[in-house]
Image (cartoon, rainbow, N blue to C red):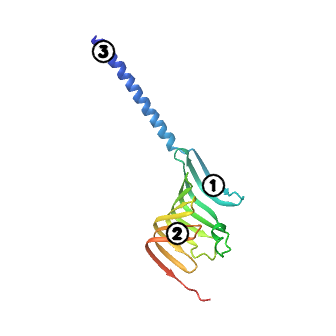
Amino acid sequence: MIRLSLLLLLVISSYAFYKFSSMNTTTIQEEILLSKPTYTAKNLKTTIFNEKGIPYKTLFTKSLEHYKFIDQTDLSNITFSYTINNEENNKSKSSSISNETWTIVSDYGVLDGNDRLSLRSNVKATTDRKDSIINTIESDYLEIDFGVSEIRTPSKVYLKGNQLYNYGYNLKGNFKTNNYSLLKGCHAKYEIKND
């Protein structure tokens, strides 16, 4: 009886050890799979068009790694152009500006599945509008939510324009409305040019 009990205990222990070791192997394999990108690309340029066939987002990156399981794309050496159609915003205004394009460059970035781009290291955004009060935004970190055309950063940021130089922290802004706020430590210099 004791031999039968020992044999039964040995069989149950062996089965438990087998299940435990196979579960760990599966977990390790899954972790390896999740840590590898689903696909990679080098020197990629892609353009997204709106419903009228007009390009409104263009991305160039030296390298890209997409991770399907976490719906994230890692980018390096990025140049991103984002065109805002301001026709809807200008219906009640007397402005004749219909489109404005911002070109954003950065060393690194992450694009998530919710159409949000987080940029870091040498981030610089410039607009093609010559009459814009703010035509350059510089920071070490910048988040862009393309769904609502908002930008934000908790980091130090520099805003430059034709007659404006402003810096501070906690930028919140909107590309469509051209409203930008520095919520902390704001310092500004305005110049009036007499022509």
Is 187 drawn above or below residue 53 in the view shown? below
Label 3: few (<14), some (14–19) or many (≥20) C-alpha neighbours in 10 Å: few
Q: Earlier in the sequence, mark 1 or mark 2?
A: 1
Question: Looking at the picture, which amino acid does disc 3 mark?
Answer: Ser
Category of crowding for the residue at label 1, using alpha-carbon neighbours closer than 10 angstroms: few (below 14), some (14–19), many (at least 20): few
- Residue 43's tag is 1
Q: Is residue 186 above or below residue 52?
A: below
Counting from the top left corner in percent of width and height, residue 117 is at: 54, 58
Residue 128 lies in quadrant? bottom right
Label 2, label 3: how many angstroms apart (C-alpha)?
Answer: 74 Å
Which quarter of the image is occupied by the N terminus?
top left
Q: Considering only order in the chain, which callout, 1 or 3, is on the residue closer to the N terminus? A: 3
Badge number at residue 138: 2
Report the residue at 64% width, 54% height from top. 44
Return the x and y of residue 47 as percentages of the image width and height.
Answer: 67, 57
Q: Position of residue 176 (x, y in %)?
A: 59, 67
Position in image of residue 96 (x %, y %): 68, 74
Q: Residue at x 38, y 25 (%)?
A: 16
| Gap between marks 3 and 1 measured at Cα | 66 Å
Residue that mark 3 sits on: 5
User: For the residues carrying marks 1 and 2, which lies nearer the camera in this image?
Assistant: 2
Q: Residue at position x 60%, y 56% from top?
A: 62
Alpha-carbon span between mark 1 and mark 2:
24 Å
Q: Are marks 1 and 2 in contact (CB under 8 Å)?
A: no
Q: Quadrant of the C terminus?
A: bottom right
Name the outermost residue toward the front: 92
Circle 1 SS class? strand
